[in-house]
Image (cartoon, helix red, strand yellow):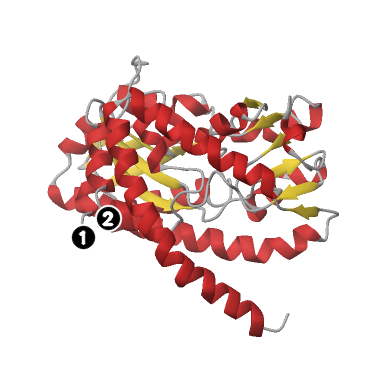
Amino acid sequence: MKRRGLLATAGAAAATGLAAPAIAQGRLRWNMAMPWPKGTPGVAVNAERFAKRVEAMSGGRIEIKLFGAGELVPPFQVFDAVHAGTAQIAHGTPYYWASKSPALHWFTGVPFGLTATELPAWLYYGEGGKLWKEAYAPFNVVAFYAGSSGVQAGGWFRKELNSLADLQGLKIRIAGLGADVMRRLGATTVTTPPGEILPNLMSGAIDAAEWIGPWNDRAFGLQKVAKYYYVPAFHEPGPGLEIMINKQEWEKLPPDLQTIIEVAASATANETLADFVYHNIESFVPLLGEGVELRTFPEDIVKAMGREAFAVFEEIASKDPLARKVHDSFLAFLRKAVVYGDRFDARLLAMRRMVVPL
């Protein structure tokens, strides 16, 4: 297994001047920053579970204090905080830091890309882990894969989408490569921190928003302000999460503590996906009972999204040699995954639907 291939160095930014972690009687006290509000289902909750698991497995030799979005640093400065040592560790998602290296997009949410089971297959056993390490090498962070939310939702819309014309001028909160695709189709995109999605929808600052899926979307109350729910997402079929550690702090750890963190991240990756799948299933039907109107993207919109997505991939890859390497490896595995998935996963789901009584 190539789990050590997932170690990665990353980061970038100015130091903010907090003291190094306190060490008392052999104990390390680390600050853990997150881009999501503390207690957010799935993401922040699993970051907390990771922290508790590390503390328990280390016999208390590492104590981790969690900071939600804005408590230690602003949400989109989490990566910089780890680089600077303001936070010794963080939980996040790679495409939030894609301004540091465009190659990071391919380790999070790629439109029409790898699913939550296919992405770690590429990372652990394919070339993904090695390439992720290479992408982070110029920076000051060590990173570990920490799971996925599974297939996400396409988003909440105030108005129904009937054709491509309905995307013209649409103000939508969407992140990553999906935002690039929507801009190419005429939408106006914004990437607001998670905690600001509902207020922006309520105020009319945006017309639509994607977040995660039934569990998180319902917890945030998005169904109260936009009734058209488009599923599934085109842009995040299996987005990746990560644990990031300041490289200097990582290198100070003895081998047993490094192994504990690696194992805790791996356990968190498995637990995170299970958490999302279970709670999305449990939340979906109740959500539909709250006046939600379920929709799928019309075929002409899907085809246009696909066309523009692959144009975006090529444009980014043509400007950055590392992005080219990552894209080519990702696409090669994706093509094989499509052939396999069409004959196994897709057909199993179709057969299951024929026989399971609802």
Asked whether, in this view, residue 331 is left or right of residue 225, the answer is left
Q: In this rendering, is residue 32 above or below 343?
A: above
Q: Earlier in the sequence, mark 1 or mark 2?
A: 1
Q: Position of residue 167 (x, y in %)?
A: 72, 32
User: What residue is rendered at 63% in x and 34% in y?
Assistant: 195
Please tell me how crowded label 1 is: few (under 14), some (14-19), or many (20+) other residues with Cα within 10 Å: few
User: For mark 2, what is the residue?
Assistant: 124
| The quadrant where residue 304 appears | top right
Q: In this rendering, is residue 183 above or below 62?
A: above
The amino acid pointed to by label 1 is Met
Asked whether, in this view, residue 173 is left or right of residue 91, the answer is right
User: What residue is rendered at 53% in x and 69% in y?
Assistant: 346
User: For mark 1, what is the residue?
Assistant: 1
What kind of element bears circle 1? loop
The CA span between labels 1 and 2 is 6 Å
What kind of element bears circle 2? helix
Q: Position of residue 14 (x, y in %)?
A: 35, 14
User: What residue is rendered at 81% in x and 53% in y?
Assistant: 292
Asked whether, in this view, residue 64 is left or right of residue 276, the answer is left
Please tell me how crowded label 2 is: few (under 14), some (14-19), or many (20+) other residues with Cα within 10 Å: some
